[in-house]
Image (spheres, rainbow, N blue to C red):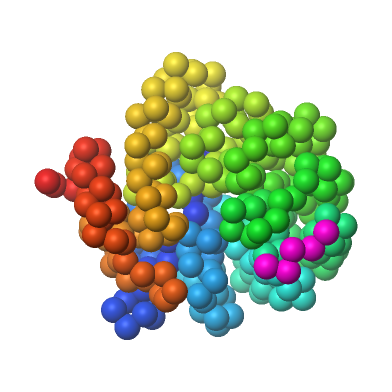
Amino acid sequence: MFTGSMVAIITPFDRDGRFDEETFRRLIDFQIENGTDVIVPCGTTGESATLDHGEHNRVIKTCIEQVNKRVPVLAGTGSNSTREAIELSQNAKQMGADGVLLITPYYNKPSQEGVYRHFKAIADNVAIPQVLYNVPGRTGMNMAAATTIRLADHSNVVGIKEASGDLTLASEIIAEAGDRINVISGDDFLTLPMMACGGKGVISVTANIMPGEVKAMVTAINENRYDDARKIHLHLLQLHQAMFVETNPVPVKTAASLMGLCGGHLRLPLVELLPDNLTKLKNVLVHFGLIQA
C-alpha cells in the first residue's frame, strides 16, 4: 500500500498563521494529477511540530476528504510521548487514514528497548498499518536495524521510512526483514541507491514542487530502467540540495510560494530564508524552469 512516489506534503498557512484549507486541497490535487502514489500529511515537512491537536486532526481530515480514496493517505501521528502517539493514531484511524507514520521518540532519547516498547505499544493499541520513521538528524537518536527487524514481526508494522543516511543500516533491514516490512527512503538523495538495494519508494520533499519527475524516477527503477533512473537522479541532485539549503521545510515552502502553489508563510520558530540562500534557491528554480528569471 505504501510504496512508490510519496510526498511529505507541506501545510499552507495564511498571512495570519491559520491553516489554509483551500490551498491545501489544491496542493493535494496537484500531487495526484502528477502521479504521486501516497499523500503524507502532518510530517516534519508539514510543520507538524507547530500544529496543536485540533489543527493536526483538521489537516488529516481535510487530506482524507480531498484525496477521496484516489490514493492512500499516510498520516503523521508520531510523538515522543507514547500515550500521545496512540491518541493521535486512533484519531487518524477514526477519520479514515489508510495508515500512520510514526517518528522515533525525540528529545527524551530512549534506549533501543524503550524505542521497541514505544512502537509495540502503538501497534498493540491501534489496529492500522504503521510506518516507522527513523531520522536521527531530527530526533537526536538512531533506531538500530535490529530494533526495526524486531518490530517487523508485528502485523501492524508494515514499513519504515529510513532517513538515517546509512545505506548499510537500510540494507541490513532489507536483508533480514524485507519480506515483512517495506523500507522506504526518507531522503531524496538516496532514493535510487536505496531502491536498488530493495527499497520500495520514497517519502519525498522535492515532490512538493516536482512530483512528476520524482514519480518518473521511481517508475524507472521499478521497471529496471536504471540508465533512465540514474539520469533523473543526477538531474534532480541540484534541486534536492536546494531543498536543504536551510532547515526543511523552509526552502521547499519558499519554492512552492515562488511557483505560485501556496503562500510561503511559516510558523515560528521557523523563519524566512536568509537573503543569500533565497538568491541561491531562486537561481536553482530558474535553472529548472520552475520560475522565470
Which image quarter: residue 94? bottom right
Residue nearest the viewer, comparing 121 with 265: 265
Which x, y percent locates residue 31?
A: 40, 50
Residue 54 % position (x, y): 55, 82
Specify the quadrant that holds the N terminus.
top right
Residue drawn at (62%, 52%) of the image: 135
Relative to 102, say whether 82 is above or below: below
Q: Per the image, is 289 magenta?
A: no
Task: Report the number of numbered marks.
Answer: 0
From the top left corner, tell me how far across and down residue 113 is, in percent: 87, 57
Query: In this image, 132 relative to 221: left or right?
Result: right
Q: Nearer the viewer, residue 10 or 137?
A: 137
Residue 110 in the magenta stretch? The answer is yes
Residue at point 66% right, 28% down?
198
Q: Does residue 144 appear to the left or right of 23 in the view shown?
A: right
Outermost residue on the left side: it is: 293
Residue appearing at x 41%, y 69% in the figure: 270
In percent of the image, x 39 and y 42: which residue is there? 241
- Position of 118 relative to 34 (above/below): below
The residue lying toward the viewer, choosing from 271 and 97, is: 271
Q: Is residue 178 visible?
A: no
Please state the horizontal and vertical placement of residue 124, each as a whole percent of the image.
85, 63
- Relative height, residue 160 to residue 253 (above, below): above
| Magenta portion: prevailing SS class | loop
For the magenta stretch, what is the residue range? 107-111
Q: Is residue 271 visible?
A: yes
| 206 left or right, relative to 180 | left
